[in-house]
Image (cartoon, helix red, strand yellow):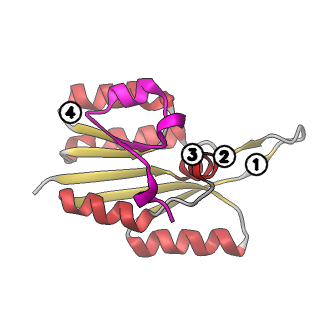
């Protein structure tokens, strides 16, 4: 059976699905689809920590589906901008599990991950798949993936 590692860039998917469709992403449907491909050995969802009830319920729902939720403090800068970026953490986790799985699936449209996917494909001979909103996913990330899955209506709530 194919061993799969699943990595969800929650902030990226939240904002891109909201911008493109005005809707939420359906993590339960994603899990169902990925589980049809093989055994999900590792599943991480990366989010920012905000102590409001809506976020806590969402994080609990992700855990119930099967994700291990990793949280980073949400930082509001004095200029009004915010920080809560998980790119390095996602990259480290993917590199750590790549030798143990057959497929790495990344849920993000962030082009910063293109080199990472190229590296794990080359060094570990794994398949790299990406789920993202087509109009908001970097072409370099799509090109780095062995298989690209555009987020469309059936993956939205």
Q: CA distance from mark 1 to mark 3?
A: 16 Å
Give the mark toward the camera: 3 or 4: 3
Estimate how packed mark 2 is, as few (under 14), some (14 to 19) or many (20 or more) residues with alpha carbons within 10 Å: some
Q: Residue at x 83, y 42 (%)?
A: 77
Q: On screen, 84 above or below 137?
A: below
Residue 75 is situated, as x and y percent measured from the top left of the image, at 76, 48
1 or 3: tag closer to the N-terminus: 3
Marks 1 & 2, CB-CB < 8 Å contact: yes
Residue that badge 3 annotates: 12
In the image, which residues are magenta?
Answer: 130-157
Give the mark toward the camera: 1 or 3: 3
Residue that badge 2 annotates: 84
Give the mark toward the camera: 2 or 3: 3
Residue that badge 4 annotates: 124
The reply, left or right, for residue 125 in relation to residue 86 is left
Q: Relative to the observer, which residue lies in front, 147 or 64?
A: 147
Q: On screen, 41 above or below 19?
A: below
Inspect the magenta stretch and tell me whether residue 140 lies in it.
Answer: yes
> Secondary structure under badge 2?
loop
Estimate how packed mark 3 is, as few (under 14), some (14 to 19) or many (20 or more) residues with alpha carbons within 10 Å: many
User: Which image quarter holds the N terminus?
Assistant: bottom left
Residue 86 is situated, as x and y percent measured from the top left of the image, at 56, 43
| Tag shown at residue 75 | 1
Q: Relative to the observer, which residue lies in front, 47 or 131?
A: 131
- How many numbered marks have been drawn onto this rendered protein structure? 4
Estimate how packed mark 4 is, as few (under 14), some (14 to 19) or many (20 or more) residues with alpha carbons within 10 Å: some
Q: CA distance from mark 1 to mark 2?
A: 6 Å
4 or 2: tag closer to the N-terminus: 2
1 or 2: tag closer to the N-terminus: 1
């Amino acid at each position: 059976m194919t061993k799969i590692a699943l990595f969800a860039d929650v902030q990226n998917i939240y904002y891109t699905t909201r911008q493109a469709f005005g809707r939420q992403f359906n993590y339960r449907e994603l899990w169902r689809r990925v589980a049809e491909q093989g055994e999900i050995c590792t599943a991480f969802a990366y989010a920012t920590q905000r102590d409001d009830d809506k976020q806590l319920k969402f994080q609990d729902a992700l855990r119930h589906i099967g994700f291990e939720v990793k949280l980073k403090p949400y930082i509001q800068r004095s200029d009004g901008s915010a920080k809560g970026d998980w790119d390095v953490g996602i990259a480290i986790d993917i590199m750590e599990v790549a030798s143990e799985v057959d497929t790495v699936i990344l849920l993000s449209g962030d082009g910063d991950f293109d080199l990472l996917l190229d590296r794990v494909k080359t060094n570990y001979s794994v398949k790299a798949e990406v789920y993202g909103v087509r109009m908001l996913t970097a072409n370099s990330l799509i090109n780095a993936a062995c298989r690209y899955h555009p987020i469309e209506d059936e993956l939205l709530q």
